[in-house]
Amino acid sequence: MRLSNRKKAPVYNFFNTLLLMMLSAGIIGFIFDEMRFNILEGKSYFLIIIPVILLIIFYLNGRQIFEYDSDGEALHFRNRNIVPFINKPLSDEFPKYKLIKFEMVNVLFLKRLYITITSKNSGSTILKYEISYLTNKEANDLKVSLNKVVKTNKEKRHQE
C-alpha cells in the first residue's frame, strides 16, 4: 500500500506564504502605527504577535509531507517539511519482518506515529513520525496496513 499527502504541498506552501505575508504586513502596520498614526495605541503589538503565534503553531504541528510505502518486502517511511531548512527530512526503510509494533498518538491537534522495530545493537528501536497533516481516512488506512504487517509478523514468530 502506498500513502502520500505530497499532492497537498501547494496548499501548505500557500498557507505558509500567507502567514509570512500576514507577519510582514503586521510589522509594516506596527511600524506605521508607532511612528506616525498611533491609532491602535498599545494594541499595535498584536499586529506582530498574532501572525507569529500562527506561524509557531504551523511549524510545531510537525512535518507536513508524509509518505508510506509497504509494497514489496520493505516498509518505507518519509517525513519532510515544505520548508527544507526548518526540520531535517526523515527517511527510513527496513524489512517488514523487523516491525514489532506501532502506536498512533493524538494530542489536541498533534498526531504522532511511533514505530518499534527490532535492532541488532539494542534489541529494539523506536522511530517517530509526525502525521498531523494526514486526514482521518489516511491515518486509518495507515493503521490498517501496519496492523496487517504486525499480525503477519506475530504469526510467523509464533510458528517458529
Image (cartoon, rainbow, N blue to C red):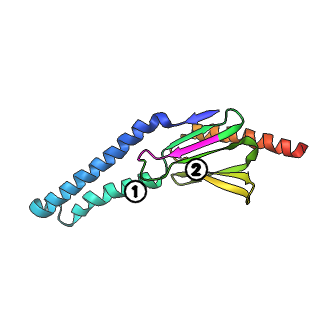
Q: Are marks 1 and 2 in contact (CB under 8 Å)?
A: no
17 or 125: nearer the viewer: 125
Q: Residue furthest right?
A: 160
Q: List the residue tagged with mark 1.
A: 56
Residue shown at the point (43%, 48%) measured from the top left:
84
- Under mark 1, the amino acid is Ile
- As drawn, is 148 to the left or to the right of 84? right
Q: Is residue 157 left or right of residue 68?
A: right
Quadrant of the image containing the C terminus = top right
* Neighbour tally class for label 2: few under 14, some 14-19, many 20 plus, Cα within 10 Å: many
Is 62 drawn above or below residue 46 in the view shown?
above
Residue at horizontal 66 percent and vertical 55 percent from the top: 126
Does dot 2 land on a helix, a strand or a loop? Answer: strand
Question: Three-letter amino acid code at disc 2?
Answer: Tyr
Q: Position of residue 25 (x, y in %)?
A: 22, 51
Image-based side of 156 in relation to 59, left or right:
right
Circle 2 residue: 129
x 51%, y 48%: residue: 89
The secondary structure that most of the magenta stretch takes on is strand
Does residue 144 appear in this view? no
